Structures are given as structure tokens and as C-alpha cells.
Amino acid sequence: MKLLPTRILPVLLLALSAFVHPAAPTADADPAWVKQVGAKTMPTAKAAFAATKYGAVGDGKTLNTQALQKAIDAAAKKGGVVTLAPGQYLTGSLFLKKGVELHLDKGVTLLGSQDLKDYPDRMTRVAGIEMVWPAALINIIDQDNVAITGEGTVDGQGKVFWDSYWALRKDYDKKGLRWIVDYDAKRPRLLVMANSSNITIKGVTLQRSGFWTVHVLYSKNVTVDGITVRNNLGGHGPSTDGIDIDSSSYVLVQNADIDCNDDNFCLKAGRDADGLRVNRPAEYIVIQNCVAGAGDGLFTCGSETSGGIRHVIARNLKAKGTKVGIRIKSALNRGGTVEDIRVDNIEMDGVGTAILLTMNWNPAYSYSTLPEGYTEATLPAHWKAMLTKVDPEKGLPHFRDVVISNVKVQNAKVAISAEGQPNSLLEGMTLDNVTMTAATAGGLSYAKDWIIKNVNITAQDEEPIAVQNSSKIKF
């Protein structure tokens, strides 16, 4: 019997070992669905449609809604790129169409009209409720294969709408109507894509939105890449979320820089009875390589959870000065399950609460009670939707299977605040390789079966994290 040469033997042994013990997939390998996120097509026609040829004037004063829409409509007939010369173009609602790319070069600014009549009412979903609401400044509705690109700016000039909200809020708070003021104070969003697919938003700066900035609604295969959001210029706009992904699927958000006055990157799926009726999840979503400054949440799921939020990866994110880092929130009449959420490689500095989980968020806003003096039969449709009672069992939300890993936090006020319910425990959560410094460690209640690995919390008050009404959890 001949012996094999010594140089061949290690190779053979390695091959045999691989056959007997095949390599296991790595723990951090992406699931197969990740390859499917984002737009699969972009408009390819390069014919340019200069808006000035259709009457657009970039003087910051002339209302250009009709001229800009004519350029869009012309581009839609053959496919092409709508372009604008440097300048400021005042406009009301615009509606992009299939095969059109709106390209905003550096030096080009679209200025949103401050007159609500320039935003026609239409049926949509706002903060989890389907209702009539002003159209956005830029709308992509029932379309496929549309893009907005460039280094230009879309400025909602939203302060007039912020001021009208605060005035109405002051009046409604006195009447016990906090729960409905966000729906009655009509404010245009900056960019809405609804019932659409293969949409790309790339490079632009979006600022001073009247309400939510980018709203991805009932859509699929969407890419939002490299945008900048600035909503605290000249004031602090209420409910000026950065990017809201609402009952949509296969969405990719990356390389975004957001400074706003509410949730920075947020997933939503409908509210209360109306959200349970629609019953459409937010799912198959990747958010990566992004930063947040001011705002209420670096990465948020909820509070609109009725249709469920699942199959989500949020990674390589940074927050500085944000109110909350990682937040999952709902209410006891909202229902829905938040599950299969992976949050990895997160850095936070100077946040309020690093990790916050709650099923009873903001009761004054979340629960609708009609004060005396109103006749329910004569109420607006969206009031009736908000007042529709939800069966307590269907209204109970559930949070489970959330993995938070490789997190570094410094200078937080609270490290962890996590609260389930006696009949809906926070189940199967994982904290892995988490290091935090905070004023206080915080607390955890109504939870079970958490995996805690390499978690180090340094609290200035030297108190440990308080664990109550929970089982199989040890820090």
C-alpha cells in the first residue's frame, strides 16, 4: 500500500472533515429575504424635460404647481427626466408618474406653498387611520418605477403648519381632545409614496416638513438612499418624523442623516380598530448605515402596530442627542405583534433612554374618549374611527423575538426601560454584547426568557437594573 505524499494529506483530511461535518451557517448571516429589499428597477429613459420650458420660474415667489406638473406629465408620456435650473420653485402638490425621474441638482429648491388650498384633499392613511387628508408636497400614488434624485432640496416651509397645530392643540387640550388633535390639524407631508413599487429616493435634502417627511405607505420594493432630513430649522416642528415605513414591504433605507422632532426611523402598521381592519404588516425591511441627531427615536417600531411589524434588520446606526435609541411602543387597544427584529451595531451618545419597550405608550394620545357635549352620530368619520372600541384581547399587543446586539451607549439618562403586561409578557428577547453608561440603569417588568450575554451597565447612581414580575432573566 502506497502512502499519500505528506503535502496532500492535510488537504484530503480537510475535505473529509467538511464532508463529515458540513460548515454551519454563521450566526450573523443575513436571511434570504434581505436580497429582495429595495427597488428592483429605476427609470432608464434619459430624455430631459426642462421645467422652464413648461413655464416654471425659480424666483421663490411664482406658484409653479401647474408648470411643474406639465413637465412631469410630458416626461411620463415617453419616460424621462424632469430637470430644473438653479433657483427656488414655489409649488403646491406634485404627482410623479411611472417612468419619471425628478432630478434636483445642487442649487435647486422646491419650496412648499404655505397655503393649505394648494394641497388637494384625498383619501390616505395618517398616523394609522385611513381618512381624507391634504396631499403631500410630492406624491407617488399608484405608480411603479419612479425616482427622485440629486443634491437639491425640498423645503416644506412648514412653520405655518406647526403654528396652526400648536394653536389647535392648546384649545383641544382644554377640551379633553388630545387624542384627535393630530388628525384635525391638517398638515401636508413632504413626500408620500402609496400603493407603489420600485421607487428610489436618492441624495436629496428634505427640510421643514409640515408633518411627516417621508411616508412609505402600502408600497413595496422601495429604496431611500443618502437623504438628509432637517426639520428643526427655524423652530421645532411637531410630528415631523424622518422616515415612516407604514404597512409596506421589501424596503431599504441606508446612508440617511436625520434631525427632526419625532421618530427618526420608524415602522408602523395601523392604529386601533381601523388598523386591525386593514391588517397589513410592515415587513422585510432593512435600515442601515444611518445617523440621527435630534428626534424622539433612532429606531422605532410603533406606536401603530395593529397589522404587525416583523422581519426587520436595523444595523450600523448612530444617535447623538436623540430622545430614545431603540424603541418599541404600542397601546392596549392597538393589537398586533412585533417580532423577528434584529438590531445590531448601534452607537449612542447623550440619548434619553437607550432601550425603551412599552405597551402603554402616551395614554393621553393613545386612548380616545369623547367628552360630554358631543353627539357621536354627527361626528366626522375619522373621529368615529378613533372612537370605535376594540375587543380587549384583540387590542393587546405582543413583543417577542427581538435581538439587540453590539451596542455601545454613553451618557444616557436611562439605560433600559422595558415594561410588558401581566397578560402579554416581553418574550424571548436577547441582549448580546451591550455596554452602557447612564445616570440610572432603569427597570424591567413583566418579561420572561431573556438571553443576557456580555451586558455591562454602569449607572451613576450605582443601582442595578430593577427586574420585577419576571422570570428567567438575570443581569
Image (cartoon, rainbow, N blue to C red):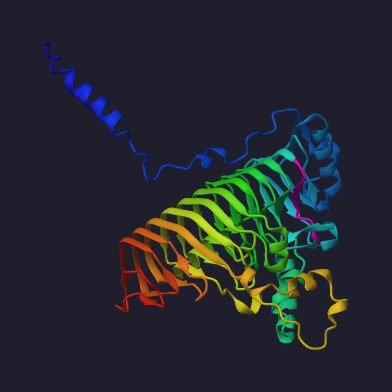
175 and 311: which is toward the camera: 311
* Residue at the extreme bottom of the image, as rendered: 372
- Residue 354 location, quadrant: bottom left
Give the side of residue 390 with respect to residue 409, left or right: right
Q: Which residue is drawn at 60% across and 55% down?
A: 229
Residue 364: say if magenta.
no
Q: Residue at x 81, y 29 (%)?
A: 78
Q: Is residue 220 above or below residue 468?
A: above
Q: Is residue 149 visible?
A: yes
- Residue 125 location, quadrant: bottom right
**Which of the image's four quarters has the N terminus?**
top left
228 and 381: which is toward the camera: 381
Position in image of residue 260 (x %, y %):
59, 62
Q: How many labels does the image show?
A: 0
Position in image of residue 224 (x %, y %):
60, 45
Position in image of residue 167 (x %, y %):
74, 77
Residue 141: say if magenta.
yes
Residue range of the region highlighted in magenta in the rendering? 133-143
Position in image of residue 186 (x %, y %):
77, 66
Q: Is residue 104 visible?
A: no
**Which of the image's four quarters has the C terminus?**
bottom left
- Residue 121 location, quadrant: bottom right
* Residue at the extreme front of the image, as rendered: 1
22 and 36: which is toward the camera: 22
* Residue at the extreme top of the image, as rendered: 2
Give the side of residue 112 with respect to residue 441, left or right: right
Give the side of residue 62 with respect to residue 167, left or right: right
Q: Is residue 289 above or below residue 120?
A: above
